[in-house]
Amino acid sequence: MVQSQTLDRTFSALSDPTRRDILEHLTRGPASISELARPTGISLPGILKHVRILEEANLVTTEKRGRTRECRLGPEQMDDATMWIESQRLRWERRLDRLEAIIERTKGEQR
Amino acid sequence: MVQSQTLDRTFSALSDPTRRDILEHLTRGPASISELARPTGISLPGILKHVRILEEANLVTTEKRGRTRECRLGPEQMDDATMWIESQRLRWERRLDRLEAIIERTKGEQR
């Protein structure tokens, strides 16, 4: 089962539009902080702060290369978040299936 | 395309363990505020505050019935969040496919 704190961090990291833009950018390949900053109009320290939050949530990894910091998608990506959401959907669908079965049974009894 | 603010609210709502517990509870069927509070040890006003945040994110709907407030899963549930995460996964997979094609081509040229 996914650790609750991991999910807190993942969902919290995803709750900001700039951070989601950074992740979208990184699906196209690794990028430096300044490459990530360019389309946003946000300062480098501002972007770095967002990248740190994504890094703490394991959604991004960074590596210092000379004078630049290369960012790429983390190995876990959004699997934890997807798994949690999917498990909710399954519970919900099972519940609908049970309700459907009850309705069918009631119909049968009424015939 | 899903509105950015909608995703902000959805992910932010999901970033709290009590709110995720409330959603898990509601996959088993509608519940009152006090039914939701019982397993958590959190006060009724505390739970109501969490429910309000889930309501603003359209993850939960509530209806006043006499002296109790019935809570149930909202119609949209977590579809927006799932859609966004899935779209990222697709981009990422397309990128892996492209990389794979390039590697295959390079191999062919080396033969």
Image (cartoon, coloured by chain):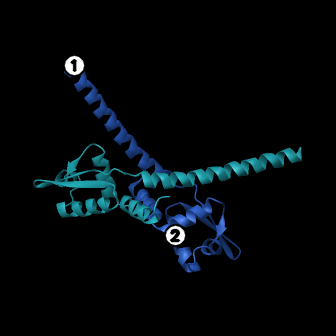
Chain colours: A blue, B cyan
Q: Amino acid at mark 1?
A: Arg
Horizontal and vertical percent position of residue B83? 48, 52
User: What element does badge 1 sit on?
Assistant: loop
| Residue A4 pos. (x, y %) | 39, 55
Amino acid found under the numbered disc labelled 2: Thr
Q: Please state which of residues A13 and A63 is positioned toward the viewer in this rendering.
A: A13
Residue drawn where x is 22% and y is 63% of the image: B46
Which residue in the rendered view is the most extreme toward the front?
A111
Please name the residue shown 52% across and 51% down the image: B86
Question: Disc 1 designates what residue?
Answer: A111
Callouts 1 and 2 in the same chain: yes
Q: Residue at x 23, y 60 (%)?
A: B47
Check the picture and name the quadrant holding the C terminus of chain A. Answer: top left
Q: Nearer the viewer, residue B7 or A68?
A: B7
Q: Name the image quarter holding residue B57.
A: bottom left
Residue at mark 1: chain? A
Can residue A76 be seen? no
Residue bearing mark 2: A18
Picture layout, residue A80 above or below residue A95? below
